[in-house]
Amino acid sequence: MNFDRSKASKAITRVRVATIDDADDLAKIAEKTFRDAYTSVNSAADMNAHCTQYFGRAQQSLEILDQTQTILLLERDGRLGGFAQLCWDKAPSCDIQAKWPSEILRFYLDQPLHGTGAAQALMQSVFEEAKKTLTDVLWLGVWEKNFRALAFYRQQGFVEVGEHTFQLGADRQRDLILATALT
């Protein structure tokens, strides 16, 4: 997908809830953005193992149909440019002060949209969607070496509250758990 950064301020950005008709496109962008983010710093074997297990039409169809999840799609000028996957009423492995915590399981943007304000638009939609539920705290896990994502989440009001292990193929990685209260 090619997005023209020079037209970013004039671009029409829309965020909507995914439907089953989006499964193919979601699978493609989910794998693409994951590979873009992590291929250069992980082994091909680990990346392939993870992508084979977690991305594909069948997997994304199950996730779209799962009533405990909502997947938001970000479209820029009619093209899919990112997505966020929310898991409702799911507590992290660390202790947080929340009655109804929910997880941002995935939050990815196509690289050409980095720095265009699209990530902030998607996160704003995440907050709005969460406020429609009983969610009082949103949390997420982010690889400790993903400095760009860490900086973005901190700008959005997330703070570190713990850690957990993320299994990428055969590689056990340390994720930081970040959380923010919804008011």
Image: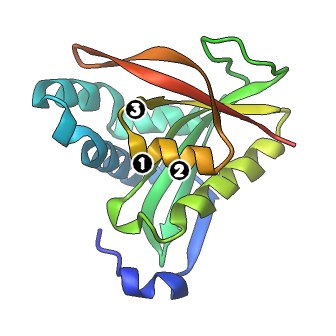
Question: Quadrant location of residue 147?
Answer: top left
Please tell me whether mark 1 or mark 3 is closer to you in this view: 1
In what quadrant of the picture does the N terminus appear?
Answer: bottom left
Which residue is label 3 attached to?
A: 59
Give the Cα distance between marks 2 and 1: 6 Å
Q: Amino acid at mark 1?
A: Arg
Give the Cα distance between marks 1 and 3: 27 Å
In the depicted structure, whether residue 93 falls above or below residue 149: above
| Residue 173: % across, % down | 34, 19
Marks 2 and 1: CB-CB under 8 Å?
yes
Which residue is label 1 attached to?
A: 148
| Residue 162: % across, % down | 58, 18
Give the Cα distance between marks 2 and 3: 28 Å
Residue in view at x 13 percent, y 28 percent? 43
Which residue is label 2 attached to?
A: 152
Please tell me whether mark 2 or mark 3 is closer to you in this view: 2
The numbered disc on residue 43 is none
Residue in view at x 67 percent, y 31 percent? 179
- Label 1 environment density (alpha carbons within 10 Å; few <14, some 14–19, many ≥20): few
| Residue 157: % across, % down | 69, 45
Horizontally, is 121 left or right of 54 in the view?
A: right
